[in-house]
Amino acid sequence: MASFREIRADYERETIVVYQAHIIREYVDDWLVGIADYTPLTKKIRRLCDEGHYDRAKKLLPAERVYPVDAEVARNLGMLF
């Protein structure tokens, strides 16, 4: 017969697995908007850089976006200098 500790440990492991599955399902269903393979593009950018064509490589990079962050969050993340 299993001890209380063994039963409790099994229950906690099962709870974690179920919880993780819920998070994964939510991520896939609600947060994930697309998947793309950027390997060919990154190889092209690398080749251009290796050849010294930095301006051409830079044009292939996505536009940089600034995301507004609350001051307290920025402070907690070490973003304020």
Image (cartoon, helix red, strand yellow):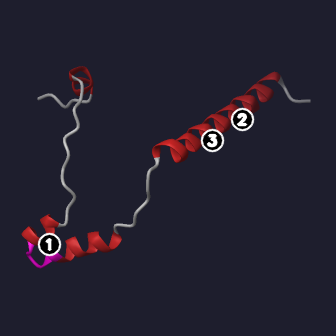
Indicate the quadrant where residue 43 lies.
bottom left
Residue 57 magenta-highlighted: no
In the rendered image, the vertical position of residue 54 relative to residue 13, given as above or below? below
At x 50%, y 42%, the residue is 30
The stretch in magenta equals: 48-53
Q: Between residues 64 and 15, which one lies in front from this camera angle? A: 64
Q: Between residues 59 and 78, which one lies in front from this camera angle? A: 59
Farthest right residue in view: 1
At x 78%, y 29%, the residue is 6
The amino acid pointed to by label 1 is Cys
Q: Mark 2 points at which residue?
A: 14
Q: Name the residue under label 1.
A: 49
For mark 3, does the 10 Å Cα neighbourhood hold few (<14), some (14 to 19), or many (20 or more) residues? few
> Which tag, 1 or 3, sits closer to the chain's start?
3
Q: Name the residue under label 3.
A: 21
For marks 1 and 3, give the CA distance.
42 Å
Q: Which quadrant: the N terminus?
A: top right
Q: Position of residue 65 (x, y in %)?
A: 20, 46
